[in-house]
Amino acid sequence: MDFKDNIRQLAERVAKLKDNITTEEATKNAFIMPFINGLGYDVFNPLEVLPEMTCDIGMKKGEKIDYAIMKDGEPIILIECKHWAQDLNLHDNQLIRYFNVSKAKFGVLTNGIIYRFYTDLIEPNKMDEKPFLEVNITDLRDSQIEELKKFHKSYFNIENVLSSANELKYMGELKGIIAQEFASPSADFVKYFSKQVYDGVITAKLLEQFTNLTKKSINSYINELISDRLKSALKTEATEEAKEEEIEIRDNNEDDKIITTEEEIESYLIVKSILRPTVDISRVVYRDAQTYFAILLDNNNRKPICRMYFNSITKKYIATFDENKKEVKHEINSLNDIYDYAKQLIETITYYDKK
């Protein structure tokens, strides 16, 4: 199961069980520990996840953070947990105190449903008041899952996450301002646009009229944009379905002429062995055709992983695909050469699972 599926499954679990979770400890066990585990960390290994780590604050001794994710003996992420029904706005000061006395670069405040991610973008070694990322595990967008994936043990890189955090922080604040202006345009916002279409003096009465016109214009533009996107998506989907149907018809007509060789089956097994650490291999299937032997993700013609061209007596080729599904052929001398293209095969899987 890949990361996205794992997180989606956890979201379903949270929605199903939350009404039966009555304590903070139960929230930690049922929701937060599985989340940490989903990030690739062993919650039962204190070298990776240290529960109740001491964070002494000045003269106040014995203060403890719920979990510290560790690397090379030092905390890299602090996690402060609350009961799922708790309002996190009441508890952010507690995490700030722990963060400011630790070596961790990231802090997470969570009730098992809402996860708020903090760092020190404004002042070094002092946690920002506002999170750079906030997600609701039961209402996740794909873009948010990609941001969560950056905290996975396999991909975690402090510099990369800090770079994303800086961008997310300001994008989040800008989106908030834009949303506010769209919902209730301020006088300055209305004047900015009205002055571009009206040369006269903007009186109070005109400002009121332009405020209504601005709101209507925004709503109309958004509706048109959504409509255009839907039409484009439906047109693309119809075209792709037609192509897929054409391929399936052609493949069915060719079935009687196709002979799948042992060499092709062996190539399929090699590709599965390469992809085993990256994807559930039950998703990797083959489909033979007259001219090539295709290996697909999810048995979908629109998700080719690679193709084997073994029909020539003198030469053999493996074809890989880039993120734009452009096919690139590579000559190979033996099946062992397939391993030389492991990176491209894994990247192809990544492209499909990001979409």
Image (cartoon, helix red, strand yellow):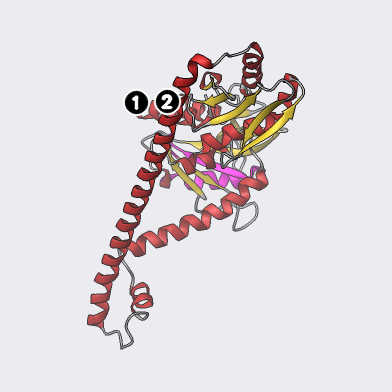
Residue 18: quadrant of the picture: top left
Say if residue 25 shows up in the picture: no
Separation of residues labelled 1 and 2 (CA atoms): 43 Å
**Residue drawn at (23%, 76%), measured in percent from left and top?**
209
Say if residue 229 shows up in the picture: yes
Residue 337 tag number: none
**Residue drawn at (61%, 20%), measured in percent from left and top?**
272
Q: Is residue 77 above or below residue 309?
A: below
Q: Is residue 349 above or below residue 212?
A: above
Q: Is residue 70 above or below residue 253?
A: below
Residue 351, given in percent of the width and then of the height, sits at 56, 37
Task: Name the element at disc 2.
Answer: helix
Taking the image as shown, residue 109 lies to the left or right of residue 291, namely left
Residue 16 tag number: 1
Residue 26, given in percent of the width and then of the height, sits at 43, 25
Task: Name the element at disc 1.
Answer: helix
The magenta segment is: 90-114
Asked if residue 141 lies in the magenta stretch, the reply is no
The amino acid pointed to by label 2 is: Ile
Asked if residue 110 lies in the magenta stretch, the reply is yes
Residue 12, given in percent of the width and then of the height, sits at 38, 28
Residue at numbered disc 2: 249
Q: Nearer the viewer, mark 1 or mark 2?
A: 2
Q: First in sequence, mark 1 or 2: give its number.
A: 1
The amino acid pointed to by label 1 is: Lys
Badge 1: few (under 14), some or many (20 or more) residues near its Cα, within 10 Å?
A: few
